[in-house]
Image: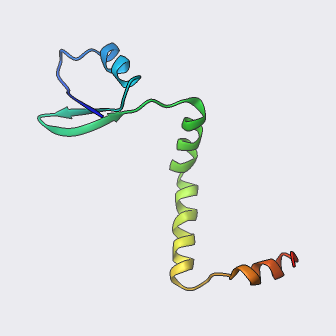
Amino acid sequence: MKQIELTADVALKHLLQEAEKEDIVLTRQGHAVALISPIDDEELTWYVRECAPEFLASIARARAQVQQGQTVGHDDLKRQLDLE
């Protein structure tokens, strides 16, 4: 991972060329402000799905159910799905 201080002299073209080789952390006054990381179309599709409010809400609901003990054991699930 490479760190580059963000200044008016830093060209976007240079940043993108460097990001093709490794992750780039952009800093301003020594503090991280952004990460540039290579990504392909499939990874972008998954990223968009994982950031969707509906998906995040479903994860929050599932965590709450687990905390409340609202779970089904493996054997019970097999019975419910008639997989025995």
Q: Is residue 30 above or below residue 13?
A: below
Q: Is residue 17 left or right of residue 47?
A: left
Q: Position of residue 41 (x, y in %)?
A: 58, 30
Q: Which residue is found at the position 58% from the left and 56% from the top?
A: 54
Q: Is residue 13 above or below residue 20?
A: above
Q: Which residue is found at the position 49% from the left and 31% from the top?
A: 39
* Outermost residue to the left: 29
Q: Which residue is found at the position 59% from the left and 38% from the top?
A: 45
Q: Is residue 39 above or below residue 53?
A: above
Q: Position of residue 11 (x, y in %)?
A: 27, 14
> Image quarter for residue 78?
bottom right
Q: Is residue 53 above or below residue 1?
A: below
Q: Quadrant of the C terminus?
A: bottom right
Q: Is residue 9 left or right of residue 45?
A: left
Q: Is residue 68 left or right of residue 11?
A: right
Q: Quadrant of the N terminus?
A: top left
